[in-house]
Image (cartoon, coloured by chain):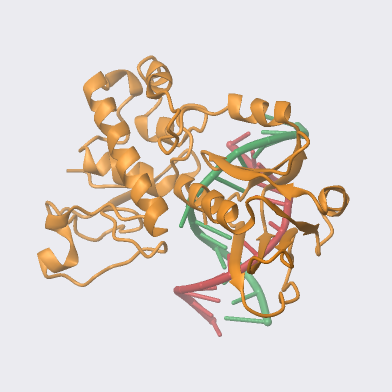
Chain colours: A orange, B green, C red
DNA sequence: GTAGCATGGTAAG
DNA sequence: TTACCCTGCTACG
């Protein structure tokens, strides 16, 4: 389940498992059947993420564009010892590689919002709608700042807007605002450049760590369960966080009860103090 | 058993 | 603003 770090991690796993290999492409569930048939036998040239979007390069100006949405899953099974097992449940797209001297591998995509075949131009059009992604080397953070500094929209909404910043989801927005003591309802216009720069740099660090570990950890060393002598509390990502889904529980820094409210159709969590 | 919710986003009205 | 996409988990009865 995906914020940007999940997609970048996935791109890496797919590239490792399938890079340079001929892949069998199928759609057991059927909704990607025609495209899968056209791609079957292609060489998997690479995989790349931009924000929460994944692009698999299958050569000949063909890319599979994947967006996992709220509950999509893309499982990669590298180094399969025996037979590749039959698909379980609704598998939109299955990639299989094997018989080429390298260990067999397969990957199943389920429940995705988007799984479509696009050209390079189509891929560019999708990317053009997205803001800079803290996880990309070629990111231009000034593009996001240009929008934030002239918007009266609350900063918590701007951070979630993929046109402003790509890859940040509901967990990272709540956590990064907490770490910088920023009121989620402050309008973008009220932020100073220095504050934005610090938020961006922190997102780069936090999300890189997320790619490395596969979970979201945002708690500083002095507030870890070990340091504070409290019970470890792991969120759904398996990580340690300050406020996400901690409604009513005491803030690790000041003890104030964590609050929640709806913002842009998503639950926002923050410490009011 | 099943209602409700979730790390997301689009399209219709 | 609302409906919808279409999966998996948890809380509840």
Which quadrant is the C terminus of chain A positioned in?
top left
Q: Residue at x 31, y 57 (%)?
A: A247
- Quick check: A64 left or right of A198? right
- Can residue A1 be seen here? yes
Task: Give the answer, above or below, for where A165 lies relative to A82.
Answer: above
Residue toward you, A12 or A268? A12
Question: Where is residue C5 drawn, in percent x and y?
Answer: 73, 52
Q: Quadrant of residue A123?
A: top right
Q: Residue at x 54, y 42 (%)?
A: A52
Q: How many callouts does the rendering have?
A: 0
- Quick check: A33 left or right of A203? right
Q: Residue at x 48, y 34 (%)?
A: A166
Q: Quadrant of residue A202?
A: top left
Q: Quadrant of residue A84?
A: bottom right
Question: Where is residue A216 drawn, in percent x and y?
Answer: 36, 55
- Can residue A192 be seen here? no
- Quick check: A86 left or right of A220? right
Q: Residue at x 85, y 54 (%)?
A: A33
Question: Where is residue B8 drawn, in percent x and y?
Answer: 54, 44
Question: Where is residue A192 drawn, in percent x and y?
Answer: 24, 20
């Amino acid at each position: 389940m995906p914020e940007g770090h999940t997609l970048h991690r996935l791109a890496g796993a797919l590239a490792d498992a399938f890079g340079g290999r001929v892949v069998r492409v199928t759609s057991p569930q059927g909704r990607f059947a025609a495209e899968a048939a056209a791609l079957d036998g292609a060489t998997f040239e690479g995989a790349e993420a931009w924000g929460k979007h994944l692009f698999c390069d299958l050569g000949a100006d063909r890319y599979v564009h994947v967006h996992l949405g709220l509950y999509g899953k893309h499982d990669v099974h590298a180094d399969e010892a025996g037979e590749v097992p039959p698909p379980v449940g609704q598998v939109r797209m299955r990639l299989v590689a094997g018989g080429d001297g390298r260990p067999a591998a397969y990957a199943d995509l389920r429940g995705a919002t988007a799984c479509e075949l696009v050209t390079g131009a189509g891929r560019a059009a999708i990317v053009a709608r997205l803001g800079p992604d803290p996880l990309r080397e070629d990111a231009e953070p000034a593009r996001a700042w240009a929008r934030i500094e002239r918007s009266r929209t609350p900063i918590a909404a701007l951070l979630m807007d993929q046109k402003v910043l790509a890859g940040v989801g509901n967990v990272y927005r709540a956590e990064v605002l907490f770490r910088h003591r920023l009121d989620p309802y402050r309008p973008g216009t009220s932020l100073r450049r220095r504050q934005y720069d610090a938020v961006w740099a922190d997102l780069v660090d936090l999300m890189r760590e997320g790619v490395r570990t596969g979970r979201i950890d945002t708690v500083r060393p002095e507030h870890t369960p070990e340091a504070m002598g409290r019970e470890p509390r792991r969120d759904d990502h398996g990580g340690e966080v300050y406020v996400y889904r901690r409604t009513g529980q005491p803030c690790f820094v000041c003890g104030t009860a964590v609050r929640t409210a709806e913002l842009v159709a998503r639950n926002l969590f923050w410490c009011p103090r």
